[in-house]
Amino acid sequence: MSIIKIENLSRTYTETEVEVKAVNNVSLNIDEGEFTAIVGPSGSGKTTLLNMIGGLDAPTSGTISINGSSLGELGGRELIDFRLRNIGFVFQAYNLIPVLTASENIEFIMHLQGRSKAERKSRTDELLSAVGLDGRGNSRPAQLSGGQQQRVAVARALASKPRFILADEPTANLDSKSTTKLLEIMEELNKKENITFIFSTHDQRVVNKARRVVTLEDGKIVSDETRK
Amino acid sequence: MIFQIAWKNIWRSRIRSLVVIVAVALGMFGGIYTVAVMLGMADQRVQMALGNELGHLQIYQPGYRDNNDILHFFNDADSMINRIETIENVAHVTHRVRVQAMANSAGYTSGVILSGINPEKEVQVFNLKDKICVDGGEFLTNDNTRGVLIGRKLAENLRLVYYEFSESALSNLEELNFSDEIISIFKTKKDEVFRSEKELKEFLMTIMDEEKANTAIYKVENATIKFKLRNKIRFQFQDARGDLSGGMYRVAGVYQTGNNMYDASNAFVLDDVLVKQASLPERAAHEIIIRLKDSDLIDETKAQISDIYSDTETKTWIEMEPMLKTMNDMMWVFSLFFIAIILFALSFGIINTMLMAILERTREIGMLMAVGMSRKRIFNMIMTETIMLTATGAVAGMILGSIVIAATASNGIDLSAMYGDGLAEMGFSAVLTPVIGAREYLMIVALVLATGILASIYPARKALKLNPVAALRAE
């Protein structure tokens, strides 16, 4: 069953003198539980596509439906609330809040959702365990390695119990050991908890793990390969 | 959790936040302390006036206050006092017989209000007894029928003082900040008498320049002054029959309230002596003065008295001296204005700090927007942070201010050496006691909060204008 339906999606940037079609008439369906990598060279439109799926950027034309809700029909506040409850984000630069501990970074999202303290605490412990960071909850981001920080970021993305996770170049800043560990964790979460992952990536190791690889070039899908 | 994050965010750039906090703290301290001094000054002036001159309420015959006509008197002040004393909020009551008189002493003349008082009742309402100068004799007693109590300024005007570098005066001067050379010159003048302030000042100008002499004269005067106690003063006035009357008195005591104008124009004798000299009935009085237990209930008490004595004029101290109340209120308005200016200036520093903080956290704010933190929550977070930053400095400033106020309030700030005479001329005490109350603190807290809120608006709006996609790409 498709969780994300993208139809004839385009995004044109007109801010500069030259009109740039970052995403050009893309149609794509993503089913629940997929582990999908969106690949392509720099400037191919991967991040723009991810931003539009995440409701951070609005398409110039075309539609995106998530679980039957069209993102274009949501107002500003509704869209923010939709993101909070349905989408988990993992960023290339981790983007953890440096003054908070790993636990607090994870808890914060649930605080925004209005969950109780007890619920936040138990979910945080559960997620830290899931990403292999038991006992590091009280560490500040600066006290963790890049790989550990990105694992906290994954745990944070999962904290809100989203329908899917968008990860923009999640391994770009990691060494190979950390990348392997992170991919193992994400793969396990995908398999065990049926969480949908969509990556934009250059990283061949991520591509190798993906069960579906969508390749973009100049904003267009040039291949869409599903593996077993 | 927003508060927790806001608090932690303040300490991200420790030095930068500390600079703002210290600036706010010092600004608040300066503001609060200045306000406390100004309010203390005004409050002391009011307390001096209440304790020495006015009491809380005064009762007159209608028209007496227009021209102080000797014929506008109460026939039986004692029965009025007895009745008024039964009113619950009344603490003490006294009366005064007053005539406008001319005081003469060895060729010097001065116009005064000569008041006849009952010493026992007087000390319950007024604190003139505590204002007797050092070596200035004593307060009136019932058996001192020819004694007169005069103000130090009147004593000076009537040349009933002289200045002498006695042993005790020299030891007092040694404790003040005079150089050894000046002290040794003073010692050469031991037991020499200066008959007037003018003579004393002329002497000082022979040993120091004029500017220093102007500053030193107040100290030297206070150390060397001697009062000519038991000297005679003749008072002349028009009695109730319109005839010229008066009497000879001897100086029993010299008081100093700190208000030169009052001290120059008020003398006190026993009431039963004065009523006879003024040809007034035995129990006559021109004013009845009341001290209250609770001054906040002044209007209610006045209404009670007015009901009993509807054919008299009952005035509150505010009605008698509206200037005092106005001055008190104005001091507070000026103080608020002063604090507001300080906070306004500080708000620019606060805004700058918060703008820097937001610039540094652009990507983080982008992330917060991306993961679903509403704009309202981001606005509130920045506002909370700004208010916390401002409030931390303000609380530190208030604590520092309170400590310094408490430390200086016990002994007061003695300005007598520099401005004593000038302050006394204006009716202010030369020893200032800083005072600040809960109401003032609350108003200042409200101003600080308002500053925090206003200073947060621009940085918070700046944060809200961020586009999450662009913010996430920021370096």
Image (cartoon, grey):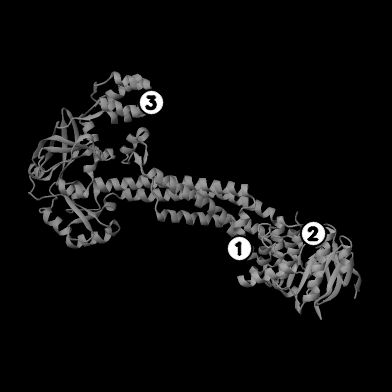
Using the image, tell me which numbered label, if any, was put on residue B2.
Answer: 1
Between A2 and B311, the one nearer to me in the picture: A2
Say whether marks 1 and 3 touch (CB < 8 Å): no
- Disc 2 marks a residue whose amino acid type is Glu
Instruction: Quickly name the residue at label 2.
Output: A15
Distance between the Cα atoms at labels 2 and 3?
75 Å
Note whether A144 is above or below B257 in the view shown: below
Q: Quadrant of residue B152?
A: top left
Tell me the SS state at disc 1. helix
Q: Is residue A164 left or right of residue A110?
A: right
Local crowd at mark 3 within 10 Å, few (<14), some, or many (≥20)?
few
Where disc 2 sits, the SS reads loop
Residue at position x 80%, y 72% in the image: A188
What chain is tagged by disc 2?
A: A
Marked residue chain, label 1:
B
What is the CA distance from the residue labelled 1 to the residue labelled 3? 61 Å
Residue B219 location, x and y as percent?
32, 30
Query: In terms of depth relative to the viewer, which is nearer, B386 or B334?
Result: B386
- Say left or right for B60 vs B414: left
Query: Foreground mark, 2 or 3?
Result: 3
For image coordinates 35% across by 50% down, the residue present is B326
Position of A143 with respect to B250 (left or right) is right
> Where is mark 3, residue-wise?
B212
Are tags 2 and 3 found on a single chain?
A: no
Task: Determine the CA span between mark 1 and mark 2.
Answer: 36 Å
Q: Are marks 2 and 3 in contact (CB under 8 Å)?
A: no
Q: Are marks 1 and 2 on the same chain?
A: no
Quarter the C terminus of chain B occupies: bottom right
Vertically, is B51 above or below A195? above
Residue at the extreme front: A135
